[in-house]
Image (cartoon, rainbow, N blue to C red):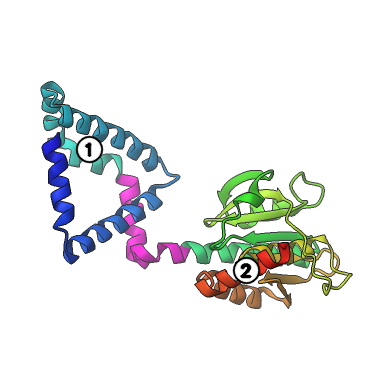
Amino acid sequence: MYKNFYWILEKIQNMGFNDILDILIISVLIYQLLKFLSGTRGWQILIGLIFILSIWLFAKILQLPTVLWIFDNIWQIALFLLIVVFQPELRRGLAKLGESGLFSLGAQSQKRVIDEVVRAVTFLAERKIGALIVFERSVDLENYIEGCVKINAEVNLELLITIFIPQTPLHDGAVIIKDKKIASAHCFLPLTINPNIPKHMGTRHRAAIGISEETDAIAIVVSEERGEISIAVDGKLIKNLDAISLKQHLIKFLGQPPPLMEQIKRKFKKKGKKS
C-alpha cells in the first residue's frame, strides 16, 4: 500500500506538460460523459459500475485473492457487457456526435432552451398573461431559490405556459432557469429600490430589475396589462421586444458570462448600496 502511495507521489513530481495535457483531455471527456448520462438510465448503471470498481480497488489494496480472481475473470467479458448495457446511450451519443460534435452539445442545448422560452413568452404576451422568467448566469441564485417550489424539469413551451396560466398555484412569482433546466417556480425576488423607476411599473418589472441589480441574472418580463415583453439586465430594462429581438438579446447575454471586471464592479456597487 505504501509502495503505491510513494509511486503516486513520484509520478506527480515528475509530471511534464504532456502529462498535464493528457489529464486535462481525460478530465474533459469524463465530464462530458457524466453530463451526457445525467438523468438517463445509463446514469444509474454507471453508479452501479462505480460501486463495483470501488470493491475491486478495495480488494486490490488489501490483496484479497478470491475477490481479485473473480474480478480478473469478469474483466474478460466486461467490454462486451458494457456495449450491451449502454447500447441505447451509445447510439444516441454517436448520433449527436455526428450531428454537432461532442463539445457543441452544450451550445445546442442552450439554443433549444432559448427557443422554448421565446416561444412561451411570445404565446403569453399575445394573450396578455403576465410572466417573469429569470436565467441564472455566473452568480448562483441558490439564495433566491430557497422557499420556492422545486421543479427541476426540462425547459419546454408547454410547462412554462402552464406555470403562468392565471389561477394556477404557481403562476404568481418567478421561474428560475438554472443549468438549462427549470429549477424552481413561485419564486419571490427582491424589488428594486431605484427611485427613477416609473410608478406605472408593477411588481414583476420591479422584481426583474431588482434581481438584475443584485446579480448578473437575466430576467424576462411579460406585462399582463399591455402584453409587452421586456428584459432586465444590469439594473436596466430593455422594453418593447418581439420574438426576434428577444431571441437576439438572449443569445447575446447568455452566450457567455460577463467579464471579470464587470462582475467585480457589480459586487462593489452592491456593497455600496448596503452601506
Q: Please tell me which residue is depicted at 66% across the width and 72% down the height of the picture.
A: 234
The Cα–Cα distance between marks 1 and 2, rounded to whole angstroms, is 56 Å
Residue 23, compared with residue 65, is above or below; it is: below
- The crowd level at tag 1 (other Cα within 10 Å; few <14, some 14-19, many 20+) is few
Residue 175: x, y in percent?
A: 67, 54
Residue reaching furthest to the right: 199
Is residue 91 shown in magenta? yes
Looking at the rendered structure, the secondary structure element under dot 1 is: helix
7 shown above or below 226: above
Q: What residue type is labelled 1?
A: Leu
Front-lying residue, 3 or 132: 3
Q: In terms of image quadrants, where is residue 43?
A: top left
Part of the protein shown in magenta: 87-108
- Report which residue position mark 1 lands on: 81
Residue 259 in view: no
Extreme residue in the front direction: 275
The x and y percentages for residue 272 are 69, 67
Q: What residue type is labelled 2?
A: Phe
Residues packed near mark 2 inside 10 Å, few (<14), some (14 to 19) or many (20 plus): few
Q: Which of marks 1 and 2 is nearer the N terminus?
A: 1
Whether the magenta-drawn stretch holds residue 95 is answered as yes
- The extreme top residue here reads 66
Residue shown at the point (70%, 71%) measured from the top left: 235
How many numbered circles are shown? 2
Is residue 150 depicted above or below 191 in this figure?
above
Question: Of the residues tagged 1 and 2, which is closer to the observer?
Answer: 2
Where residue 240 sits, quadrant-wise, is: bottom right
Identify which residue is drawn at 14% across, 52% down. Answer: 11
Residue designated by label 2: 268
Q: Which of 126 and 68 is in front in this view?
A: 68
Measuring from the top left, give residue 99's x and y in whole percent. 36, 66
